[in-house]
Image: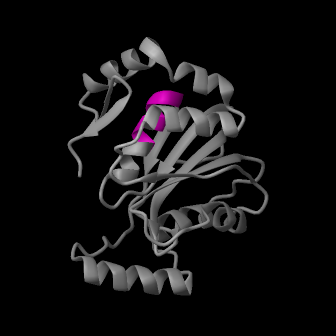
Amino acid sequence: MKEFFIVSYSYTGHTHQIAQAIHTLTGGDWCEIYPWQPYPMAFPELLEQVRKEVQTGYHPRLLSGTSNAKPYSVIFVGSPNWCGSIAPPLASWLAKNDLSGKIILPFYSHCGGVPCNFHREIARLCPRADVRKELGILENLGTDLPGILRDWLNQNGLQSLSDAYTGNQYKEIIEKENNQSCVLTIRNNSACSGLE
């Protein structure tokens, strides 16, 4: 059985950055999910659509190509916090996959708006999974992302991964990824990216 799988939906790129850092850390397989019908680019239309989808529990159709989570024991799942909830594309993926017996580690990006409880929502969608403590990251990523991820992994019983995420060993992994045109770069324990 493979160990780590990362599934994420990102609208602006902020959740993508967190998922990329987790991917680099774990070496796990990573799948980004996309709704069949893209969301509006204009904020007022986006907000109206998201509110309706969250209130009704709508699960949008996803583009095909999403990997199967069956062979993995630990699943990292992430999305933006939309209206205090999981983004509907991630809720759709969770509802369509049997994650019984899996460890699920939820993460989300947010701008400090409406508080959310991803743990509760994911536990409702995946009642036979072991849903662990969630991680919320402010969208500006001006924080110490490596330290935050290290603490989160420790809190969730993944100490061995946390140990690998420190010092030169981690910097070498990042530099290797940068040579392959990665979005996220980490230098001297600070995150910087071309995405805003």
Magenta stretch: includes residue 20: yes
Residue 67 image position (x, y, % from top left)? 51, 48
**What secondary structure characterizes most of the magenta part?**
helix
| Residue drawn at (28%, 83%) of the image | 45
Taking depth in this image into account, of 142 and 9 the one nearest to the observer is 142
Specify the quadrant of the image occupied by residue 119. Answer: bottom right
Q: Is residue 92 visible?
A: yes
| Residue drawn at (59%, 27%) of the image | 162
Query: On screen, 123 above or below 71?
Result: below
Q: Is residue 183 visible?
A: no
43 horizontally vs 19: left or right: left
Specify the quadrant of the image occupied by residue 112. Answer: bottom left
Residue 33 image position (x, y, % from top left)? 43, 56
Quadrant placement of the N terminus: top right
Residue 74 image position (x, y, % from top left)? 65, 40
Query: On screen, 9 above or below 29?
Result: below
Task: Name the residue furthest top.
Answer: 168
Please give the range of residues in magenta. 19-27
Q: How many marks?
A: 0
